Image (cartoon, rainbow, N blue to C red):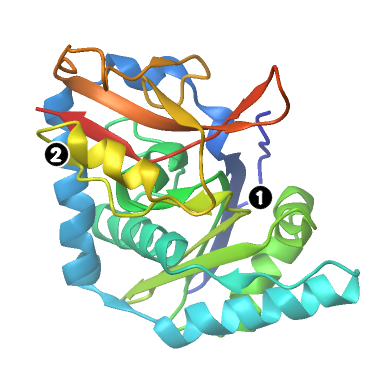
Amino acid sequence: MVKSSSAARDELSRRGFLAIGVASLAAFPAAASAIPPSEWLQYEARLRARLSDAGGGVFARDLAEALLDLSNAARDDVGAPPCAWSSELALTASAHAADLAQRRYISHVSPEGFHPSHRVGVLARRMIGAASENIAYRRGPATPTAEAMMAIWRRSPPHWSNLLDPAHSHAGFGVATDGEHTYAVALYGRPNGELGAPVPFRLTGEADLARAVLRASPHFDGFSLAPPGDARGWGSAAGSGRDLRPGVYQLRPERRVDARRYEVLWGPIFVKV
């Protein structure tokens, strides 16, 4: 289901804020299949570089941690369980915040067409599960407080609903500041498990993929592969005597529901070279 909204922009002479529509992991299915592998490799390299240079600014880790505390306080007020800090979601949120800061745009979608689902799949190399994204932007002569950034989401019902969603169990925040510009990104989710090892983004042999799934916790009964974000999948080539063709894939772990049904989950994205 796609969750989206529009939010008002308030630009004053020295201050402003912006909250943009909520985005969920499953909201952007098959368009990614048109993006060639070379662009996926470049985007992954871009995100890794932004984690090193904060987009020319600095990461405000104290603000990110305070946003989790404020979020959990708000969740407690409505009877929702607290979210635990997720290092993989925080890494992904920080990379996007830094990319926003460097290229001065405010969107869930990068200029190349990559969505939140893609970023989670590119940077969360062990997480199994979905996530939803909030973004907030504020401009002013001084770095805003965590309360000021939270107030942006509080004024937007879709963002506030996302933040309070009782189905979420984990969250990660990234805040990048560059001069008068502050960008905050939040990712909320409920991980279904963790792979036994990180899946290499540039995959050369499928054995690494199989090992990661076999050692996952909890145990998964198998996996399929599909274009990033595509709800469809097909069986892995493992054990078939065939090599996996070069291309871009998303790992879809499978968990047995009953004797006849399997639940197909979201996993990392990788480029088979």
Secondary element at image label 2: strand
| Point 25% across, 35% down: residue | 270
From the viewer's perspective, is residue 111 above or below residue 90?
Answer: above
| Point 38% across, 38% down: residue | 118
Image quarter (top left, top right, bottom left or bottom right) of the C terminus: top left
Q: Is residue 111 visible?
A: no
- Residue furthest to the right in view is 78
222, 168: nearer the viewer:
222
Residue marked by disc 1: 8
Earlier residue among tags 2 and 1: 1
Mark sitting on residue 202: 2
Count every numbered label the image shows and give the total.
Answer: 2
Structural distance between the alpha carbons of marks 2 and 1:
40 Å
Residue 206 falls left or right of residue 76:
left
| Point 38% across, 42% down: residue | 213
78, 151: nearer the viewer:
78
Amino acid type, residue under disc 2 in the picture: Arg
Residue 150 falls left or right of residue 223:
right
User: How would you rate the neighbour count of disc 1 (Cα within 10 Å): few for under 14, some for 14-19, many for 20 or more?
Assistant: few
53, 195: nearer the viewer:
195
